[in-house]
Amino acid sequence: MIKSFKLPLLLLLFMFLLTGTNVFAGGFDSMKPEIFEKAWEGLAKFWNFTGFANAHYTNFIMIAVGLFFIFLAIRYDYEPLLLIPIGVGILIGNVPFLAGNKIGLYEEGSVLNYLYFGVRQGIYPPLIFLGIGAMTDFSSLISNPKLMILGAAAQVGIFATFWGAAILGFMPAESGAIAIIGGADGPTAIFLSSKLAPHLMGAIAIAAYSYMALVPVIQPPIMRLLVPKKERLIKMKPPRAVSKLEKILFPIIGLLLTTFISPSALPLLGMLFFGNLLKESGVTERLADTARNSLINIVTILLGVTVGASTQAVRMVTDPDTGELINKGFLSPDSIKIFALGAISFVVATAGGLIFARIMNLFLKGDNRINPLIGAAGVSAVPDSARVVQNEGLKCDPTNHLLMHAMAPNVSGVIGSAVAAGILLAFLM
């Protein structure tokens, strides 16, 4: 019996609170219509602030992309440390909101805008390079320096993409920023685009990281197409042992040599070799451990989320010529062109490394010959492309381990893409 009276009693209490009168004493006649009007206005105002009221169909397209990134990371283990932060960032950046409340990434004073400062000003990429240097072993490259050529050969994708972007109508600075996608190096792509084409940074960064994550999908068919099975079976002699002195001297000499050639790449290369010296010196293990663990993890989170959030589908800005509001959101013809160019550049970079490795074998004899598969590791997707080479080698011969050999062009590709970025920056700034 008591339960049957709960709903009517709650309704009476609600009416009492709403009207500010004693319902039981004065009845419903004392209720004021303007109270209902204000309540309705409040509900209408609340609705205007919701994502449902501000949604555009492009928001849902980008949300689907973000969910796809998360799916790839969890289901197939494709670069989860990158794709999950970026995927969540895409979701965050594409929740619709009412502009002017300091919520969005592009609104001055918002939390996301402050975090994005590290991307916009190129702060995060050098810190990523510091961590990469602290976790990288250059022994395989030091023991076989000629493999550095393969890292340089793979950078042909950068310059091929530059001309492709120019043909599609991009300005020279924009073409340079897009071209670096061919290096398969996300931090370098962000660093260069922040200097040359900040308005394209979101598309460039997402394209670069997407193709880095898809290395296990993109590279194997190209490797099988361009390298005959007979050459895939080549076994390379074990790399020689490298002394501690060589490991210490390499980052010092590498820093001076590469930055004298390309001073514009100093923030990236300086931090890369600094991190490696922390590792190899043997006396700064605590600093090296911080750089390769805590620091790079924190920066990766901030970089991934903010880069993902920069893919805001709807971003209304005022046209300086007409004064009209126009949408400068992520989904645009330019973004589609950038993704297409990125795919082509990645294919060209992989092919460049493979073909040049085969050409090198024309001048090498006996056990000095190299397995051409390691040329695919010249793209600087460390260490994923080296792992792909290892897997392809084992498929042809379960006893043929190529990982250590592939790491040589892989780490030289990191250096090569940074040097190429510096050269482009010097020419196009």
Image (cartoon, rainbow, N blue to C red):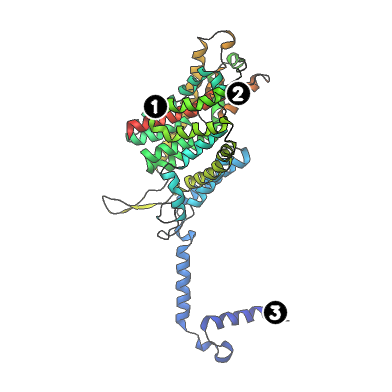
- Which residue is at a point 43% across and 27% down the rendered structure image? 256
Residue 404 location (% of width, % of height): 60, 23
Within 10 Å of disc 2 (Cα), the crowding (few <14, some 14-19, many 20+) is some
Using the numbered discs, state the Cα–Cα distance from disc 2 to disc 3 in whole angstroms. 76 Å
- Which residue is at a point 48% across and 59% down the rendered structure image? 51
Q: Quadrant of the C terminus?
A: top left
Disc 2 target residue:
404
Question: Closer to the camera: disc 2 or disc 1?
Answer: 1
Within 10 Å of disc 1 (Cα), the crowding (few <14, some 14-19, many 20+) is few
Is residue 8 placed above or below 354 in the rendered structure?
Answer: below
Disc 1 target residue:
260
Left or right, 61 with respect to 167, comes to right
User: In terms of sequence position, does the residue under pointer 3 or pointer 1 come before the other?
Assistant: 3
Secondary-structure class at tag 3: helix
Left or right, 63 with respect to 168, comes to right
Q: Are marks 2 and 3 in contact (CB under 8 Å)?
A: no
Three-letter amino acid code at disc 2? Met
In front: 247, or 171? 247
Secondary-structure class at tag 1: helix
In front: 414, or 390? 414
Left or right, 391 with respect to 131, comes to right
- Which residue is at a point 46% across and 63% down the rendered structure image? 49
User: In terms of sequence position, does the residue under pointer 2 or pointer 3 come before the other?
Assistant: 3
Is residue 168 placed above or below 301 in the rendered structure?
Answer: above
Three-letter amino acid code at disc 1? Phe
- Which residue is at a point 56% across and 19% down the rendered structure image? 143
Secondary-structure class at tag 2: helix
**Image disc number at residue 4:** 3
